[in-house]
Amino acid sequence: MISRRLFRIKTLKLLFSHAPSDAEPIDMKQVEKEFQVSIKRLYDLFHFILSSAVSVADYAEERISIGLQKHLPTYAEMRPNRKFVENVFIDLLRRNRPLAHYCKQNSLLWKRDTTSTIRDIYSTMIEREYYKAYMSDPEKDALNRDRVFLKRFFMYEFEDNESLEAMLEERSKWWGSDDLGYVLGAIIRTLDDFQPGQSDDTPLLQAVRSRANKEFAARLLRHSLMHYTEYRNRAMLFVKNWEVDRLATMDVMLIVQGFAEAVEFPEISVKITINEHVELAKYYSTPNSHVFVNGVLDRMVKQGIADGLIVKKALAQEPAGTH
């Protein structure tokens, strides 16, 4: 599924944008509206990128047809290698009704305005070693070969793709590089769920499972905002020789959100909560912020447990693979 880390990133960015101040009270309706939009766009990106494999295969099929229709086709054009266009798992995606319905309903089809991106992806793909090895592989275990190939396709063809990034930015301001990386991970795990011979109505399980994370993020965002001033002031009790206005704003947000998670979710272990927010500090704040966030948040949580504000279930632990 799309990991909770991405959902924590979503809530952190909204907290950064809408943290309450003495001058302006928080508009919870507006924040929750933005949250719903950001999560919806995340699901949109998941379906849009997943469906791209079908469009690239269709483009490859068109090139084969053009070659066969030439007046004087080459030897290779007369005997095209159809392994890619006949990939079993691409065919499963092509026939999957939930995927097709979602893309059509939300205008996520790869049309004329995305033709250049599809062409670029195809042109780059056919020059890569994993594609050449796949196309020349005589292995009879086609199912394993096809699945592994398609997972590599999503691993290699979408990150650091300038044409794709420009197209995604043009289509939606909500589609950032963070989203793409985590969505690609969810897609690769989704392919592990697919089985040959499955019904065309088989749901995309990774998308379905992410609903629990959406609920998690909504609760985390609401609690962080409603208790922002309280938790920020509490954090200052554990900050020596620093004034609040001299701290990195993102560090304060990370500490507030981390403490809010520790309070709001008794089923998530303290270790996971702290580690996750320390990792976010490495990417979204200053070079030394992860050390600062770790130290302050650890002391805050210990005091919160002593005060009875934080209560954890016995042996509580976030489910494997969700954090």
Image (cartoon, grey):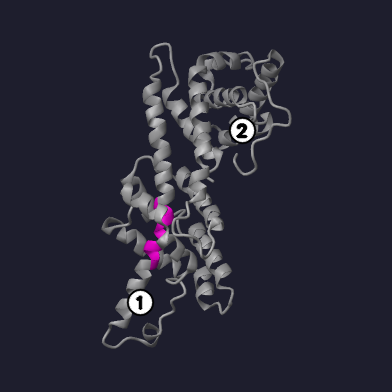
Q: Which of marks 1 and 2 is in front?
A: 1
Q: Which of 298 and 150 is in front in this view?
A: 150
Residue placed at 52% from the left, 65% from the top?
196
Mark 2: which amino acid?
Val
Mark 1: which amino acid?
Ile
Image-based side of 252 in relation to 23, left or right: right
Q: Is mark 2 on a helix, strand or loop?
A: helix
Residue ID for mark 1:
64
Q: Distance between the residues labelled 1 and 2?
A: 51 Å
Q: Which of 87 and 199 is in front in this view?
A: 199
Residue 278's tag is 2
Residue placed at 59% from the left, 32% from the top?
277
Residue placed at 32% from the left, 80% from the top?
67
Q: Can the viewer see residue 288?
A: no
Query: Dominant secondary structure of the magenta stretch?
Result: helix
Please identify the quarter of the rendering in which residue 125 is found. Answer: bottom left
| Part of the protein shown in magenta | 48-57
For the residue carrying disc 2, how many other residues have a C-alpha within 10 Å: few (<14), some (14-19), or many (20+)?
Answer: many
Q: Does the magenta stretch include residue 55?
A: yes
Q: Position of residue 9 (x, y in %)?
A: 50, 35
Please identify the quarter of the rendering in which residue 303 is found. Answer: top right
